[in-house]
Image (cartoon, rainbow, N blue to C red):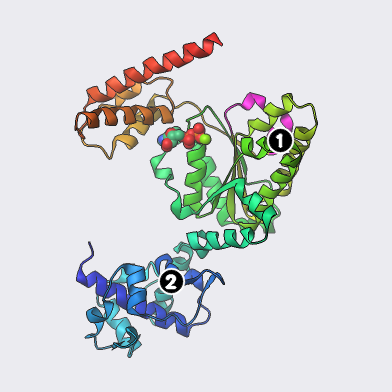
Amino acid sequence: MENGNDQVLNIVELALTAHIYNNNEQLDENDLPPNIRKGYWNAKDRKVDRPIVVSESTIDRIYGIPHGGALVKSLPFVAFEEFGARINLTVPDLAAKWFTNHDSLSRVEQNPVLAYYFGKTGLADVDYRKVRSLNRPKETDRGWIQSLIDEIAGEGEEAEDMLKLVAISAPEDVRESLQKLVLTDEQIEEVQQIVKAIQYREYLKEIELFEIGKLLFVGPPGTGKTSVARALSKELGLPFLEVRLSMVTSQYLGETSKNIGKVFTLAKRLSPCILFIDEFDYVAKTRLSDEHGAIRRAVNMLLKSIDDVSLVDDGVLLIGATNHPRLLDSAAWRRFDKVVDFPLPDKDMREEIFKKILSPLQGTFDTRELADITDGCTGSDLRLILREAVLRGLSEERTDLSQDDLKEAVSNFSRRFELKMSEYENI
Ligand SMILES: Nc1ncnc2c1ncn2[C@@H]1O[C@H](COP(=O)(O)OP(=O)(O)O)[C@@H](O)[C@H]1O
Ligand SMILES: [Mg+2]
């Protein structure tokens, strides 16, 4: 819960931001902190209109403070116009000085508009360019992505069909994060390289290095392929477009290759973004049973589209994922610059995963022992084990779990796992 002082600081920060923004045309939407930008977002024109007006209703919308006027009207640099419930700064310099005297450097460091003014006037020791580069840009806002989607949807039936093939999420809506995942050294290295490649995209273009930005994630189900791809969207602040090839190809065959083309068109329009193609093996699988040549055309379309898309030129990071690497032929492999392996986690990784997934729980656990008895389990299996233990606890009205609860869940899980395996063996 915010105290009154924080609320006053919020309002003064907003009033100062508005004043500086309105008076400096060179500042743009990406100088505004995301919460303020959202509060003034004009979805139709996809921008923030000048001037920004601070009123009780905007304060309420942005900070959830219903009667902001009363909180600040006694400050010597504020004029509160009761009638329109508007807040203006009468002496902006004084407001800025007052603000710096209230231990608010951390706010300036997270608000490029303030950093611009406070740095220029020497009121604070901040680097405007750095603060701006750390500010989440408008392209990552849900509102920005939604307005692009609406625009595309408005173009007619074709466009609407295209949107049905792809699940689109804004990075701010992605729940996965790299911090919550346990990665192999190779995976960490790949992730770091791709993060750098995106940061230095302009440089790569200059030196004409285009062979980057097409990754293929390979490994058994439940080893974190989808999670890492989504976490990258959050980390990089890029919209996430997820395509299931089974969906694209399950439609009327003649349409398949057209659909694949549409997906790539969409990705280029939403760029910079991540295009995640799951079940990459699906095409190869269906190709084996293809008698009409329609699937073959679709595969060719897919491969051609992959050739035609580029991270450096188009801002599309392509990530394919497959559980069945053996089904892919060399024509498919060749299209990717990097194949990233997602192995079953070893004992150390399993222990790390247990540590992470158990950390929000009450109780102390011997994660080493748990790692010992879960050989062959994926990260997803470990989560299922945790779920089982938690639900069992809840059925006895308990939220505190013991090592025994988890061990029991492991043994139940293994029993089911063996059952499942023996079913497979009978096929
Ligand atoms: N290495 C890992 N570290 C932490 N959690 C993992 C890991 N691998 C898988 N998980 C968890 O298992 C679940 C399923 O993973 P997912 O990314 O869907 O796997 P895949 O796409 O490879 O089938 C997710 O909730 C994920 O958090
Ligand atoms: Mg997956």
Callout 2 secondary element: helix
Sequence-first tag of 2 and 1: 2
Residue at point 39% right, 75% down? Answer: 114
Quick one: quadrant of the N terminus? bottom left
Give the extent of the magenta segment: 322-335
Q: Height in image: 285 above or below 298?
A: above
Residue 376 visible from this viewpoint: yes
Q: Is residue 21 magenta?
A: no
Crowding around mark 1 (Cα neighbors within 10 Å: few <14, some 14 to 19, many 20+) is few
Residue 55: quarter of image: bottom left
> What is the secondary structure assignment of the residue under circle 1?
helix
- Mark 2, residue position: 112
| Residue 127 in sight | no
Front one among 149 and 369 = 149
Residue 288, placed above or below residue 29 = above
Residue 327 within the segment the image draws in magenta: yes
Reply above or below: 323 against 114.
above
Q: Is residue 52 left or right of residue 76?
A: right
User: x and y percent of residue 30 in the render?
Assistant: 50, 69
Q: Looking at the image, which residue is at 50% across and 64% down? A: 138
Labelled disc at residue 334: 1
Q: Furthest-top residue in view?
A: 426
